[in-house]
Amino acid sequence: MRPHEPQAWKDMGAEQFGRRPVGTGTYRITAWERDRVVGVAAETAWRPAKVKNLDIRVIPENAGRVQALNSGQVDLAWSLEADAIPTLELAGNKVVLSRTNDTLNLILLHQKQGSPLADVRVRQALNYAYNKDAFIQTVLRSTARPIGQPAASTMSGHFEDIKPYPYDPARAKRLLTEAGYPNGFKMTAEIVTSTGEFQPTMENMANDFKQVGVAMEIRNLSIAEFVQKVLRQKQWEGEAFSMMYEGHPSADISRIMGTHSCLTRQLANREPHTCFEEIMPTILAMSREFDEKKRDTLAKQVAQFYHDQAAIVFSHERVLVDGVMPKLRGYKLVNRVPSYHEISFAN
């Protein structure tokens, strides 16, 4: 939680406070532009800075961020793709890998009437058809772990004995045939491609699905369009979309259920994209249980249910890849936020 300074909030109001934030952080922001944030060390910070000046610039493309770091234009490059690792290391820079509480998945809109995805056998078939291990080993350079349940292994509500779906295209074809789709079917996935490994993940899924007869068309969305559709301000045009199961900041499975279950109706006042009424009593009981052992039992039932129902095509636990100059010291992420006060430079 980041509490607002109460008097400043009262005096300035929400809009002006957003433009001129007041806080106890390491840096005082002196300029907030569309593609740049500038700050100086705050004298009254609770966590004093070791470096006086801060200059954050938006470089949208992964290749541009890599080039900026390798050419010495920046000291730190955030949110890079795993295939940049050899280039960074060859240039003498360091790579920082940070595990997250998030997993990357393809959300299946199972409630659409008449959709093949309404059949659990079809959803399971897509999971068996996706070779996530090969994708992790090649594209992600073995930096991530495959996943087969809602919570990442860094979180409460993750259970090691609930295994990811293995790659089994023959079984996928059998399930599709049993469900009445021996020749497969066509579907559309709407995805955001402007960040991380979203695009290569979905492209690899589409290629693997094709091997069992499922033709998945990928349509790219801007982040603004994606948010509008998640909030149901616009309708989904396809049968699936890319989205993380986000566990930050609480690192607990209940955080995920608030977004990816029927709870969305009462928590966010909108229709959920994932909703299985039969598991809701268990989810609610889990959320209210204070006895640790009893809560673990309930959480495991929820995790197993989501695995068995294949509400999504599970892929992998996200690992953030950042590049830093050799002289930079103390950089690390805590709940996806840099510890600015610990950053320094070697003499």
Image (spheres, rainbow, N blue to C red):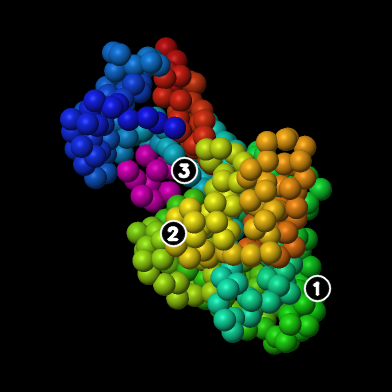
Q: Nearer the viewer, mark 3 or mark 2?
A: 2
The mark nearer the N terminus, 2 or 1, is 1
Q: Look at the image and tell me whether residue 137 can be seen.
A: no
Specify the amino acid type for callout 2. Asn
Residue at x-position 34% and y-position 16% = 45
Q: Quadrant of the C terminus?
A: top left
Specify the amino acid type for callout 3. Ser
The mark nearer the N terminus, 3 or 2, is 3
Q: Quadrant of residue 34?
A: top left
Q: Look at the image and tell me whether residue 109 can be seen.
A: yes
Along the line of sight, the residue nearer the viewer: 72 or 95: 95
Residue at x-position 59% and y-position 52% = 257
Whether residue 59 appears in magenta in the rendering, the answer is yes
Q: Nearer the viewer, mark 2 or mark 1?
A: 2
Q: Quadrant of residue 7?
A: top left
Which range of residues does the magenta coloring cover?
58-68
**Residue tagged by mark 1?**
171
> Can you tell which mark lies on residue 79?
3
Q: Position of residue 195 (x, y in %)?
A: 45, 52
Q: CA distance from mark 3 to mark 2?
A: 32 Å
Residue at x-position 57% and y-position 64% = 274
Q: CA distance from mark 2 to mark 1?
A: 39 Å
**Residue tagged by mark 2?**
269
Q: Position of residue 294 (x, y in %)?
A: 76, 41
